[in-house]
Amino acid sequence: MAPPAVTLVNVKTRNETHIELEWTKVNNINTYALKSSDEPETPITGLDGNTVTHTVSSLSAGTKYSFTLFTVLEELRSTGFEFPAVTAPPAVTLVIVKTRSETDIELEWTKVSDINPYTYILKRTGGTDTPIPGPAGNKVTHTVSSLSAGTEYSFTLFTVFEDARSTGHDFSEVTAPSNVALVNVKTRNETHIELEWTKVNNINTYALKSSDETETPITGLDGSTAVTHTVSSLSAGTKYSFTLFTVFEGVRSTGFEFPAVTGMSLFLIAKFQGSCFFSSQHLKTCVS
């Protein structure tokens, strides 16, 4: 009488080229034969214990294979247990940031394959898994939202094929930092303006852009809550426009725009004697 067939085969481990199978012995029988599609049979002999493991190797990544497992007792074999199993798909190799803001990061990557129906799962450290379908075309985009400004986040992106995940592509990205809320003129004279502002989330790096498109990198001092910077080589009695960017891990804020004026020389005061001016704070000043 032919022996009974195995009733269940589990995938114990898998990667892109190997599938490790495991099943419970039938009536403590140690001998089996595994046949895969278009491949010769592989005889398998179990070890002591009530389970048998066998690794199928030299496979292709992200591929579904069909197998038939026979229980073998002397010259007799079972009818065969048929089952499919898939290898792990390849991992994404690069994720870029398409756009970002203080609360959102839009990610983009190239599909692993246009042929297989792969999907994706994005896992944020400390967060939940987010399933992402593979749309038409060769690019996938996904926006991570509800984030905090000026913060670094760690992610793992998995390619998914049926119930199998790739090893995962690890990467980190940052949101844009917030703008400075206010810039004060601490001191000024005919050629210099000393600016001061409160640090944003204790960030030390900033960039100041003037109306002539010149940019100046600025680094605040550790331990201080404020940053000061002096703009020099200016003209007396002149209004200048500035944009101050907060910089975090090479990413800039949208920019805080503000004007500032230099002091007037005695010559200009004499020239405009009897005239009135309005300051940036809308205060009227008359030269008498």
Image: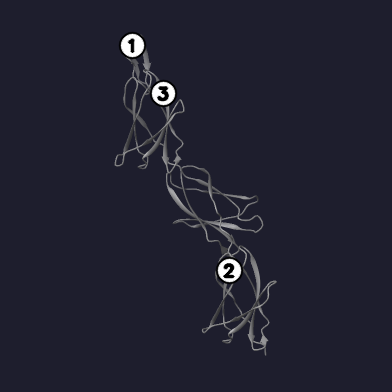
Q: Where is 32 relative to 288, above or below?
A: below
- How far across and how far down the image is residue 163, in percent? 58, 65
Query: Which numbered disc covers residue 240?
Result: 3
Query: Which numbered disc covers residue 99?
Result: none
In the image: residue 11, left or right of residue 234: right
Q: Quadrant of the C terminus?
A: top left
Residue at horizontal 37%, vertical 33%?
Answer: 182
Residue at horizontal 67%, vertical 88%?
Answer: 75
Q: Where is 166 relative to 285, above or below?
A: below
Q: In the rendered image, is residue 160 in sight?
A: yes
Q: Which residue is mark 1?
A: 267
Quarter where residue 221 is shown: top left
Among the two numbered marks 3 and 2 on one chain, the one whose residue lies closer to the N terminus: 2
Q: Furthest-bottom residue in view?
A: 1
Among the two numbered marks 3 and 1 on one chain, the one whose residue lies closer to the N terminus: 3
Q: Amino acid at mark 3?
A: Tyr
Residue at horizontal 32%, vertical 21%?
Answer: 189
- Of badges 3 and 2, nearer the viewer stands 2
6 or 71: nearer the viewer = 71
Q: Which residue is mark 2?
A: 18
Q: Amino acid at mark 1?
A: Phe
Q: Amino acid at mark 2?
A: His
